Image (spheres, rainbow, N blue to C red):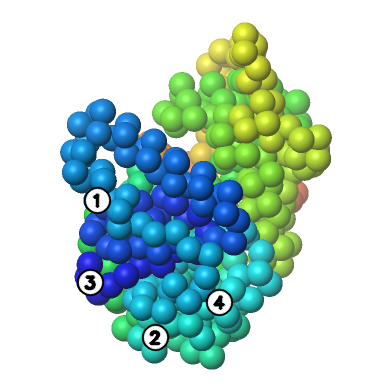
Amino acid sequence: MNTKYKIGVIGCGSMGSGIAQVASTAGHEVVVYDTNAAAMERAKANLARIMNRLVEKGRVTDHEAAAIQARIQFHDNFDSFSDCGLVIEAIIENLEIKQKVFAELESRLGAQAILASNTSSLSIASIASACQRPERVIGIHFFNPAPLMPLVEIVPSVSTDDAVLSEARSLIDSWKKVTVLAKDTPGFIVNRLARPFYGEALRIYEEGVADFATIDWAMKTLGGFRMGPFQLMDYIGNDINFTVTETVFKEFFYDPRYKPSFTQKRMMEAGRLGRKSGKGYYDYAEGAEPPAPNEDTALGQEIFHRILVMLINEAADALFLNIATREDLDLAMTKGVNYPKGLLAWADELGIEVVLKQLEALHLEYGEDRYRPSPQLRRMARSGAKFF
């Protein structure tokens, strides 16, 4: 597939608009579909503003900016997708709605067209089951903002044809994105491996070990993460983050490792969604002073290492279950969520036996399956092996 193919995008929210911009920048004609006329007008205005900013920064010329915008057309009719070679759905994370859209979309496309979902946590196989030809359905999961974030998870279902996988991945690679291949399991790579970053931070807070600011300080200053977990949850939105956690928990048959937090649920119920609502774990009102953290290094190291070993354990278990290769697991976390190091490489650096001992201590202390060490860590500790 190359730029002679027209690309379709369903949904003109921030993700759909971003994907459209990426495809158009790569030279494709793009059709964006949405039923909300006001949303389409906002998307057009936002695209114009983004292009003007890129021109001002010297990233593109006036001519290039105009061409990128001209290649994107907005429509409210599914028939506009009839000559598209690939259509990417980027709408609400609701399985029934996605299935309905895919069933309707399939009848409007050519026989060779690929149908893709940008879902972050729903089953590609379940979405594809609504289609007469599930073999041409695949997951193509971008990260927000799509024009800036390099990572794209490519997720074939058990029904996806190998030729569809190869063609879809080659296309996204040609858009200068970093692609990783993930098994069709809840959360794929990033949204699965990142759960402890939020979940264990919330647990530490709920136990009264430290407040939001101190936990964020520990992860940024001592851990080297760009944002602390509570800052990041406020940035993502507590409604979105909680929904992803709840979905992963349910899809993993209520494995306690992914159990959602009542603290975050109450934040969501109170409308304290984070930056977009003006208040979340922090107050974003003009003039509001950020709380001061407790910069006790010993406490900070305890917090950082507790969260880190939980992250490493998740990565090790994903490798154990063949969710992705070790290279793709680490690449996904550095390119998808800007972790300072790949989690498996980090385990090698700390020492796998050290990681295992800390997890075993947590498991013994709490007696919860949440802290069970992955068999992958146990095997490697016995053999003295490393991930890399």
Mark 4 nearby-residue class (10 Å; few <14, some 14–19, many ≥20) = many
Residue at mark 2 to residue at mark 3: CA–CA distance: 15 Å
Residue at mark 1 to residue at mark 4: CA–CA distance: 30 Å
2 or 1: tag closer to the N-terminus: 1
Q: For marks 1 and 3, give the one nearer the viewer.
A: 1
The reply to whether the C-beta atoms of the residues labelled 2 and 1 are less than 8 Å apart is: no
Amino acid type, label 4 = Phe
Name the foreground residue: 184 vs 239: 239
The reply to whether the C-beta atoms of the residues labelled 2 and 3 are less than 8 Å apart is: no
* Residue identified by numbered label 2: 110
3 or 4: tag closer to the N-terminus: 3
Residue drawn where x is 36% and y is 75% of the image = 84
The reply to whether the C-beta atoms of the residues labelled 1 and 3 are less than 8 Å apart is: no
Q: Split into 4 quadrants, where in the image is the N terminus?
A: bottom left
For the residue labelled by badge 1, is the local secondary structure a helix, a strand or a loop? helix
Q: For marks 3 and 4, give the one nearer the viewer.
A: 3
From what the image shows, is residue 14 above or below residue 340?
Answer: below
From what the image shows, is residue 150 above or below residue 274?
Answer: below
1 or 3: tag closer to the N-terminus: 3
What numbered label is drawn on residue 4?
3
Residue drawn where x is 48% and y is 82% of the image = 108
Amino acid type, label 2 = Gly
Q: For marks 1 and 4, give the one nearer the viewer.
A: 1
Residue at mark 1 to residue at mark 3: CA–CA distance: 15 Å
Amino acid type, label 1 = Ala
For the residue labelled by badge 4, is the local secondary structure a helix, a strand or a loop? helix
* Residue identified by numbered label 4: 102
